[in-house]
Image (tube, helix red, strand yellow):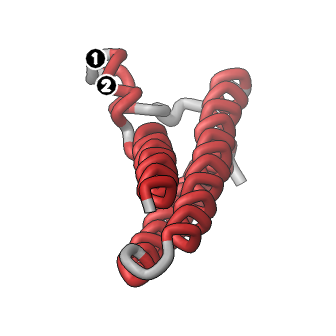
C-alpha cells in the first residue's frame, strides 16, 4: 500500500470517528434537553441533576473531540515527514484564523456546557425561592 493511500485511509477513519462523536454528542444532548422539559415544573432538584449530567457529558465530549483533532494533526505531521504528496487540511488555510474557534467540534461542546451550567444556576435559584 502506498503512503498516500495509507494516510488517506487514516484520515477517512478519523473523520468517520469525529462525525460519529459529534452525532453522539448531539443525540445525548437532545435526550437530556427532552428530559429536562418533562422535569422542569415538577421538581427542581431533578432539573439540577439533569443539567449537571448534561454539563459533564458536554465537557467529556469536548475533550473527546479535541483528541480527534489532535489525531488529525498527528496524521498530517506524519504524512509530511514521510513525504506524502497528498494535500492535507485544504480548507484550513482558506479561512481567517479566528474562524477555527467556531468549528462545530470546538464550539458545540462549549455552548452546551455553558447552557447546562446556566440551567444549573437558574434551577438552583428557583429552588431557593421556593
Element marked by disc 1: loop
- State the residue position of label 2: 99
- State the residue position of label 1: 96
Left/right placement of residue 3 relative to residue 50 reads: right
- Residue drawn at point x = 31 percent, y = 25 percent: 99
**Does the CB distance between marks 2 and 1 fall below 8 Å?**
yes
Give residue 21's quadrant in the image.
bottom right
Evaluate whether residue 78 shows in this view.
yes
Q: Position of residue 127 (x, y in %)?
A: 49, 60
Q: Residues within 10 Å of mark 1 (few under 14, many from 20)?
A: few
Left/right placement of residue 83 relative to residue 34 reads: right
Specify the quadrant that holds the C terminus.
bottom left
Q: Position of residue 23 (x, y in %)?
A: 47, 67
Element marked by disc 2: helix
- Residue drawn at point x = 49 percent, y = 76 percent: 43
Evaluate whether residue 9 shows in this view.
no
For the residue pair 50 and 24, the one nearer the viewer reads as: 50
Q: Where is residue 85 in the image (x, y as percent from the top left)?
A: 54, 30
- Residue drawn at point x = 45 percent, y = 32 percent: 89
For the residue pair 1 and 129, the one nearer the viewer reads as: 129
Q: How far apart are marks 2 and 1 (CA)?
A: 6 Å
Amino acid at each position: 500500500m502506498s503512503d498516500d493511500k495509507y494516510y488517506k485511509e487514516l484520515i477517512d477513519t478519523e473523520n468517520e470517528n469525529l462525525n460519529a462523536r459529534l452525532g453522539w454528542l448531539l443525540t445525548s444532548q437532545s435526550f437530556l434537553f427532552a428530559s429536562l422539559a418533562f422535569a422542569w415544573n415538577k421538581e427542581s432538584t431533578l432539573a439540577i441533576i439533569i443539567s449537571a449530567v448534561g454539563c459533564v457529558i458536554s465537557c467529556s465530549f469536548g475533550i473527546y473531540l479535541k483528541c480527534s483533532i489532535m489525531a488529525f494533526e498527528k496524521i498530517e505531521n506524519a504524512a509530511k515527514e514521510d513525504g506524502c504528496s497528498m494535500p492535507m487540511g485544504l480548507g484550513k488555510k482558506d479561512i481567517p484564523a479566528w474562524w477555527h474557534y467556531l468549528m462545530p467540534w470546538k464550539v458545540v461542546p462549549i455552548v452546551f456546557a455553558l447552557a447546562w451550567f446556566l440551567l444549573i444556576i437558574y434551577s438552583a435559584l428557583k429552588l431557593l425561592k421556593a
